[in-house]
Image (tube, rainbow, N blue to C red):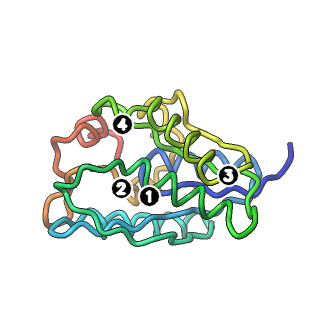
Amino acid sequence: MNKKTILLSFSGGLDSTVSALKLRNAGHLVTLGYVQWNIPGSPFGELQKKAAKSLSEVLDTPLKVLANVEAYSHAKWSWVQVIASMILWEASYPIKRYDAVAFGMQVTGCESWQRVEYTRAVVENNAKVVNYSGELLFPVDGLGRQEMWAEVPNDMKPLLWCCNIPNQDGTRCGHCYKCIHDRNQI
């Protein structure tokens, strides 16, 4: 196996954490590329940032904050496009610094524009736009949430961020897809 330097799109959630574990355990040099979301009136960004920092420390893997993005809940934009663009741009300029970029976005139970096929298409198209010439990796492609939870060591599980609609006090909502599906995992 060739050891690669990989920039991983990292949120501190289940998919990206399992991707980090898989890539690191395969012997690759992984950097966690993180986009900080600032959503007025929502604790989402701060909770995600806390998870990303904590997991970076536990994984002993560098965390690189790529951007701070102001987002508004009423805005109609694709977070997948924003993240893919930031990660690929970072990996491409000023010189190719990574052998590969990896995306752990395994979106299920959501609107069709957020599904895995959409994510892959966005990443592949954005790679062409920024002239990225390295390898594109999707380490958790095809894995279900239950399979991914089985990959996470028990001591790491409480650190992961897994709720789409957090309460104002930062607790999990209990009713989004992730909360319902992950209820017995954490």
Which labelled disc corresponds to residue 161? Answer: 2
Query: Residue 71 location in percent, x, y?
Result: 27, 63
Separation of marks 3 and 4 at Cα, in angstroms? 24 Å
Q: Earlier in the sequence, mark 4 or mark 2?
A: 4
Between discs 1 and 3, the one toward the N terminus: 1
Query: Mark 4: few, some, or many residues within 10 Å (few <14, many ≥20)?
Result: some
Front-lying residue, 174 or 135: 135
> What type is the residue that disc 3 sits on?
Asn
Q: Which residue is mark 1?
A: 12
Q: Nearer the viewer, residue 83 or 76?
A: 76
Location of residue 91 by image quarter? bottom right
Quarter of the picture containing the N terminus is top right
Q: Position of residue 148 (x, y in %)?
A: 48, 37
Circle 4: element type: helix
The mark total stands at 4
Closer to the observer: label 3 or label 4? 3
Q: Which mark is residue 114?
A: 4
Disc nearest the viewer among 1 and 4:
4
Left of 98 or right of it: where is 162? left
The tag earlier along the polypeptide, 2 or 3, is 3
Label 2–label 1 contact, CB within 8 A: yes
